[in-house]
Image (cartoon, rainbow, N blue to C red):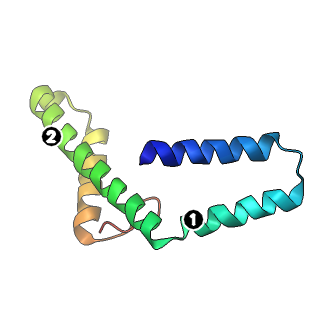
Amino acid sequence: MRYKLTFVAGLALGYVIGTRAGRERYEQLKKSARQIAQNPAVRNTVESAAQSGREVAGKAFASVSEKVGDKMPDSVADRVRSLREKSRDGAEDDWGTSNT
């Protein structure tokens, strides 16, 4: 699904950049993109993907920190810790999506 969306977005961007259709067609594409982005199904999919990414990152951090031990930089450990706290609090992340 992600690859299809990436392909469609790239195709639309290439069309906008390469077209000579003018401003009117650009505005139509912009409106369509905004409608897609505001679609609840798309928003839920994006939030679900973001949550999955957070979970995978947490597992990766745990796995790496077990193997690396005290050699993990404090800045990395602090950042992961703060992300975990945000996800537990139900706060929004850096991109404005909720951690649902």
Where residue 40 appears, as percent x and y from the top left, is: 45, 72
Closer mark to the observer between disc 1 and disc 2: 1
| Left/right of residue 23 with respect to residue 97 in the rendered view | right
User: Which amino acid does the dot numbered 1 rest on?
Assistant: Ile
Q: Quadrant of residue 28?
A: bottom right
Residue 48 drawn above or below residue 12: below
Where residue 50 appears, as percent x and y from the top left, is: 36, 55
Which secondary structure lies at badge 1? helix
| Left/right of residue 78 with respect to residue 21 in the rendered view | left
The residue at the point 27 percent across, 48 percent down is 80
| Left/right of residue 95 with respect to residue 21 in the rendered view | left
Q: Which residue in the structure is indicated by mark 1?
A: 36
Where residue 1 appears, as percent x and y from the top left, is: 41, 48
N-term mark: 1 or 2: 1
User: Which amino acid does the dot numbered 2 rest on?
Assistant: Ala
Q: Which residue in the structure is indicated by mark 2?
A: 62
Residue 93 seen by the camera = no
The residue at the point 46 percent across, 42 percent down is 3
Q: Quadrant of residue 7?
A: top right
For label 1, count other residues whose C-alpha is less than 10 Å away and answer few (under 14), some (14-19) or many (20+): few
Q: CA distance from mark 1 to mark 2?
A: 36 Å
Task: Count up the numbered dots.
Answer: 2
Where residue 66 appears, as percent x and y from the top left, is: 9, 33
Q: Quadrant of the C terminus?
A: bottom left
